[in-house]
Amino acid sequence: MKVILLAGGLGTRISEETDTKPKPMVLLDDKPIIWHLMSIYAAQGFDEFIIATGYKGYVIEDWVCGLKTTWNVQTLDTGLDSQTGGRIRRCMESLPDERVMVTYGDGLGNVNLRKLVDFHDHHGKPATVTAVRPPARFGVLETSNGLVTNFGEKNQAEAGWINGGFFILESNILKYIKDDLEPFEAIVMPRIVEDENLMAFHHEGFWQPMDTLREKNELSELAKQSSPPWAEIY
């Protein structure tokens, strides 16, 4: 099964790092985050990748050309202005009638991909999303009559579930994507949900996006470990 990595966005929320390179090429320790992401898949037997490029895609293309690995890695220019739905659509059209894995190029998690595939096979629906707990970003205040009675980090278990990427999509999901300008999250996924065709695989282990400079620095420190948390399959 091939893995589509969405790597074409502008990365404006972390512009300190993305003026000269696409977000998936931001370094964690000495390797780009997309390398760490691909390692999660390859370690579990999924080592055929299509990187959907857009913004400064030539940086990714040059990196792939110099990549010394046994992985099968291709890039596909999916356009500067395409949204996530359009990028998925273009990649899937290049793989007619194939089931694919899809994820974002800026989030790491120790998702058990074999369990994810088993879950997808069992329910028989055309789409599966991995549901994760959002990371605690802010201190939570509890007050009584204006007096702060407790202050601390929000418990992730109390924060509900969010879209963590790590999708599995069947080829017939293409009918839900009308054009390149449709965001997968805001437009396409609600269509799939309306038809009761989206299932959620709940992941309780490590998951961390790289939306801010603070999160980038946190992931960089974790990447220095001999076995970072995203490498320890949950």
Image: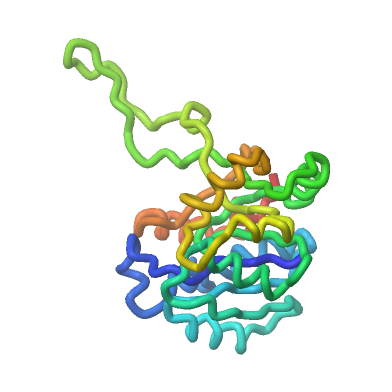
Q: Is residue 224 above or below residue 112?
A: below
Where does the image place residue 194, in percent across and percent down from the top left?
59, 40
Task: Name the quadrant of the N terminus.
Answer: bottom right
Q: Is residue 135 above or below residue 48?
A: above
Q: Is residue 35 visible?
A: yes
Where does the image place residue 174, in percent across and percent down from the top left?
65, 60
Q: Is residue 207 above or below residue 154?
A: below
Residue pictured at 68% horizontal, 84% vertical: 68
Where does the image place residue 12, in percent across and percent down from the top left?
33, 65
Q: Is residue 125 above or below residue 44?
A: above
Q: Quadrant of residue 91?
A: bottom right
Number of callouts in the render? 0
- As drawn, the residue found furthest toward the left would be 146
Residue pictured at 46% horizontal, 70% vertical: 82
Q: Is residue 200 visible?
A: no
187 or 57: which is nearer to us?
187
Residue pictured at 60% horizontal, 63% vertical: 37
Residue pictured at 60% horizontal, 83% vertical: 64
42 or 149: which is nearer to us?
42
Task: Name the quadrant of the C terminus.
Answer: top right
User: Left or right: where does residue 213 sit relative to residue 74?
Assistant: left
Q: How is the image coloured?
A: rainbow
User: Left or right: where does residue 121 sit relative to residue 167?
Assistant: right
Where does the image place residue 24, in percent across and percent down from the top left?
49, 69
